[in-house]
Amino acid sequence: MEFFRSHVLVCSGVNCTFKGSRSVRTALVDEIRAQGLEQEIKVVETGCFGLCEEGPVMVVYPEAVHYCRVSPEDVKEIVEEHLRKGRVVNRLLYRGDLSPKAVQTWQQIDFYSRQKRVVLRNCGLIDPDNIDEYIAREGYEALGRVLRNLEPADVIKTIKDSRLRGRGGAGFPTGLKWDFTASATGDQKYLICNADEGEPGTFKDRLILEGDPHSVIEGMAIAAYAIGASKGYIYFRGEYHLSIDRLTHALKQAREYGLLGNNIFGTGFDFDIEIKIGAGAYVCGEETALINSIEGKRGDPRYKPPYPASIGLWGKPTCVNNVETLANVPAIILHGADWFRSIGTEKCPGTKVFTLTGNITNAGLIEVPMGITLREVIYDIGGGIPNGRQFKMAQTGGTSGGCLPEALLDVPMDIDSLAAAGSALGSGALMIMDDTHCIIDVVKCFLQFFRHESCGQCTPCREGTQRLYELVDKISRMEATKQDVELIRRLARTMDDASLCALGQTAPFPVLTTMRFFPEEYEAHIDKGVCPAGICDAVSQTA
């Protein structure tokens, strides 16, 4: 076994990779070798640290010094000063703190200290390509306990008692979904991990799989044992190349270690996982459209009932869970349902992974207890609005989520509280916008997405998304009347009542919430013929 006096973890998540982290890693390895330190210092490619805006990011252990915006040109100084002489390079610390008590360790940075990491417990701490590092952090211990000591019904009871709810958007109780599938009659049952992220601003599942693929594999194996499935699928978007590569490698390692395949842990339990790659249709995030896609059919949603728990993949009982949902499972098994319920709120315990995007200082990936307020997320963790601008709107739950104003900054971020406020937790995408944006223009962008992504199978969605876009476009051109606003409301009700799946049901949500919380912007465009932000004025003049 090799021992090193220092480890340097370089983020290789997709965001830091785009900013050049691979070049930084290469320069670091070369410089360490040039200075004869390769026997003392190990460089590790790890998953996302979360502070994507400050990438490329690296952390030096055992000091846990957190360097940001590192370039290949900075590497020689880091090696000579820090790795050789033990002198921290202050200018590369978070925010370039040069004070005598400069923030050095990532645990001391507000962005991290306010978080609670359960799903992201290993991201940024291990080499995601090394199964031994996952095992060293209690990896696969939960699976061993389940297969050796628990009956499937015991596992389902634990998940039920934890009150874990699905993290993909709907928030359905996970234990109940497992119970339905376990109780269904069938000679073959399937488990599907939904890793299809199609909403703009949503990339949490991608980064979970890039940083800790084994946690999802272990969660799937536990779920499969509980519901009686011997075959699992992970459904990816085709553009998630790094996630697919890492998961492919992780599956190979798990099979080699006897953690997937036949007779796992000598218990007679058989389970294996296959990767399925989709073509990138947003609607395939809906579970029955996803099932159709796996079967080789057009990715259209099915009529429900019957639900997948009774008639799913190839007509067999099937359970579909989200990536984040499954990554919670090993921790719940290890620490217990009571522990999980001690985090978050009574009705919605645990943590939630969010992606922070838009006009926010610390854009990136965070994990916080359910029930934290929107204000805390934006200002305490996100660092507030950059460039001295004022907060205007937060869209929670992705493109199909609600748009909340400043008056609702203290709303708790959990499924029930956001629903009561007129929004949704959804997929965990959190888009922040400052006062330079026009609400009408923003909503029009959302509706452009929905009309493009509608599968066209049902009339309310196919025609409704197009008509909604046209009506909002009419408002942006200062050509609408108050009758058009009433028409939007009537159309939204029809789409909600009659659309086949959640795409058509939720597509009007951004329009309805902005009409509710930002009526003055609609009035300005319709009654006064002006755009307060000056954006739509330019559009109408060039039309």
Image (cartoon, grey):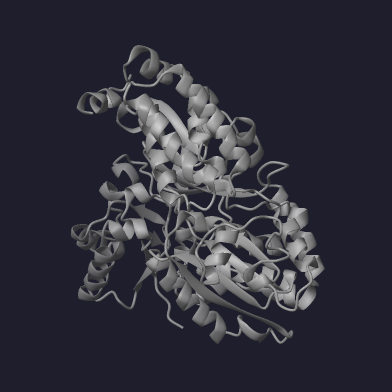
In the rendered image, the vertical position of residue 369 relative to residue 60, given as above or below: above
Along the horizontal axis of the image, is 147 left or right of 329? right
Q: Is residue 508 visible?
A: yes
In the rendered image, the vertical position of residue 478 relative to residue 180, given as above or below: above
Along the horizontal axis of the image, is 164 left or right of 423? right
Quadrant in which the C terminus appears? top left
Residue drawn at the location 69% of the way across and 72% of the way down: 316
Task: Name the residue at the left extreme.
Answer: 73
Q: Position of residue 302 (x, y in %)?
A: 61, 58
Q: Position of residue 429 (x, y in %)?
A: 48, 45
Q: Position of residue 420 (x, y in %)?
A: 64, 32
Towards the viewer: 78 or 476: 476
Residue drawn at the location 80% of the way across and 66% of the way down: 183
Residue drawn at the location 67% of the way across and 67% of the way down: 318
State the image quarter where residue 347 is shown.
top right
Residue drawn at the location 41% of the way across and 48% of the way down: 200
State the image quarter where residue 337 is shown.
bottom right
Task: Name the residue at the top extreme.
Answer: 528
